[in-house]
Image: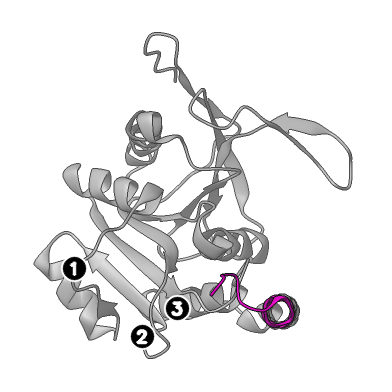
Amino acid sequence: MRQPNGNSFTYLHKVSDVKVKPSAVVIQGLPGMGLIGKIAANFLIKHFNAQEIARIYSSFFPPVVQIDSKTSMGRLARMEIYAITETTPNLLILTGDAQPHDIGIIQVLNSVLDYVIDLKADTLICLGGLRVHEEGPEVAGFGYDKPTLDWLEEHDVTLLKGGEVTGAVGVLSALAAERNMKSFGLLGKLTLAGTDPKASKALLTKLTKLYPLKIELKDLDLTIEEAQAKNERITSLAREVLEQGEDEAKDQGPGYYI
């Protein structure tokens, strides 16, 4: 599936055929704030031993080659779609190395929608991160029609009240709604510097309330502990640097003449 546009292109390569039951749910977890959505998507892929079914290449991805840390083999930056057929509903997981560049994001994400709609998927969930105050909700949501919003509130999802949703989380969910899919986003509260698997766990916990997914989330606890320890080291180092700067400023005296 090629979509040329002048010197640009987007290419969807089918890796394998799989029988996906109608009314499948697409879950998007691309790299973004705190890698919250990507960590959640990768967890689902590993937990259910998902089958890779498609790869998306595009000139709108960063011009880099990813080198595998174990095999030392390189590969072009891409997005991937995995199928999980043992759940009800079936799941299609969209993840990848990067989000497409702003000028090509609609072209790339429309190619994804063409493919999943052809597989009879009718629902799309975008996972991402949210910066809020400490008293903010662990998971916030947004949608595009009242029945979906009512359904989210019935499952104790706090709805966004104004603001903007940027990147693939906003654009893909909006495009899906325009194409008559049930579409909504779930955003986990960012609490750690760097990656935030704690927020990813909150998203996955909410997903198990929305859909009958049998997953053991304790497997994320070690990852959370490691991220929290790293966050504490970063915070401590930042505090030391700040205090050192203040001490040096005191030693120098006033920076003016009387």
Query: Residue 135 — which label?
Result: none
Q: In what element is the residue under mark 2? A: loop
Q: Position of residue 24 (x, y in %)?
A: 38, 54
Query: Residue 136 — which label?
Result: 2
Q: In what element is the residue under mark 1? A: loop
Mark 2 or mark 1, which has the lower sequence index? 2
Q: Quadrant of residue 146?
A: bottom left
Question: Is 202 left or right of 176, judged from the image as shown?
Answer: right
Question: Is 168 left or right of 222, judged from the image as shown?
Answer: left
The front one of 175 and 253 is 253
Mark 3 or mark 2, which has the lower sequence index? 2
User: Alpha carbon of mark 2 to alpha carbon of mark 1: how far?
Assistant: 14 Å
Q: Quadrant of residue 223?
A: bottom right
Kindly identify the amino acid type of the residue bearing the numbered disc 3: Thr
Q: Residue furthest right?
A: 71
Q: Which residue is mark 3?
A: 208
User: Alpha carbon of mark 3 to alpha carbon of mark 1: how far?
Assistant: 26 Å
Give the magenta range.
245-258
Which residue lies at the image location 68% right of the left edge and 82% below the top edge? 250
Q: Quadrant of residue 113?
A: top left
Q: Position of residue 191 (x, y in %)?
A: 53, 79
Query: Residue 162 — which label?
Result: 1
Kindly identify the amino acid type of the residue bearing the numbered disc 2: Gly
Q: Position of residue 245 (x, y in %)?
A: 70, 75
Q: In what element is the residue under mark 3? A: helix
Mark 3 or mark 1, which has the lower sequence index? 1
Which residue lies at the image location 28% right of the left edge and 83% below the top edge? 155
Tell me, yes or no, whether the two marked residues, 3 and 2, touch with CB atoms within 8 Å: no
Q: Is residue 201 above or below residue 125?
A: below
